[in-house]
Amino acid sequence: MSRKQKLIYSLIGLVVLLVVLFVVSKLVAWREQAIGDITTQTNEAGTITIGVMNPSLITDMSWTYEGETYSMEYRSGVWDKVTDVAFPVNQTVLSDMTSAISSLTANQGIPNVSDMEPYGLVVPSMTIKIKADNERLTYKIGDKNELTGEYYLQLNTLSTVYLVDADIVETFSKGLFEIMQVETVPEYGTTASATIENANGTIQILHEKTDDGERWYLDDENQTLLDSSAASKLVNYGLGVSWLDCDTYQATEYYLESCGLTEPRAKITLTDTDGNSFTLVFGNETEGGTLAQFEGSDIVYVVGTDTADYLANATVESLLPAQTDEAA
């Protein structure tokens, strides 16, 4: 090979090397923009941004709460529970969590910490793990600083301990029920009728607006007037139902029967003036309350026993206006 050819090959090799270096630098720059600098950076406001990244790139996330670990994965535009894709995940809650962890900032950093024990980071109270574009980050949250109300945090295995606001702890202090997409009362306007069924019988109530207010009365021949406050209270127990917990989200007919929901102790059906209607049924008592569900649903919830008891004990007599001495 001539000297000239060697020179040409050397130049070609140099050009190729420069091209490779250029491409690599662009890839690194893109990656830093997308994932962020996990070694943190200080903002103009003086706060320290930790693990900056684009939240839309997070594909896996897990956290510990009250001794349990919850693992989620993002696939096809939806968050699913890793161990049970049938679990109804509240997508808004998971979106809030990814936004919170991707924009996490610290008010102070304590560098070169050799012993994490004083900060509660050897056995952290909470651990958050995320994966974004094959980058894995682990956030260990330790003790609370009682003076500032902030929490100590360690990113991956870095020797710096950060002080972060309590918001991140509150955001991730969620168990299974808190991340579940629970059912809510359907779109509903002004009540037109209510039907209550319990061991005392069936009570059918009608409601209408009048020039001087409103009128609640029984659906009978005499249109027997009811005490407005008592009737409204009964209806509001249905409209304002509050789930305390989820018992199951995949109830079978056999399971519903065992819960006392196929022959409930109380049942209320509410219908508004536009024809929108829903029915709530209340079954057996359980730990922490009473089992209940929207009729026809596969999800069984736990509600306060006071709600179930009030509907189960309702009678026509309890809804009639109190008699005055003169009337008596």
Image: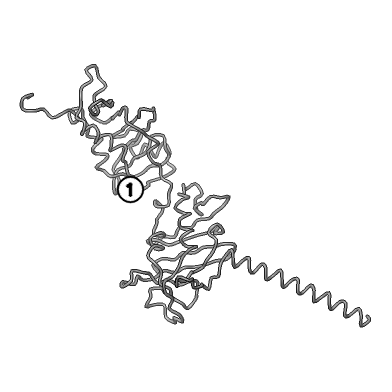
What percent of the width, then of the height, locates residue 204?
Answer: 27, 25
Residue 221 in which image quadrant: top left
169, 265: nearer the viewer: 169
304, 217: nearer the viewer: 217
What percent of the width, then of the height, locates residue 118?
Answer: 37, 78
What percent of the width, then of the height, locates residue 6?
Answer: 89, 80
Compared to residue 102, the image places residue 114 above or below, namely: below
Name the amino acid type tagged 1: Leu
In the drawing, does residue 191 fall left or right of residue 101?
Answer: left
Residue 58 in which image quadrant: bottom right
Residue at the right extreme, as displayed: 2
Taking the spot 38% from the left edge, 28% from the top edge, the residue there is: 274
248, 78: nearer the viewer: 78
Residue 225 in which image quadrant: top left
Location of mark 1 (residue) = 244
Which quarter of the image is occupied by the C terminus?
Answer: top left
Taking the spot 44% from the left edge, 81% from the top edge, the residue there is: 113
Taking the spot 49% from the left edge, 68% from the top edge, the residue there is: 138
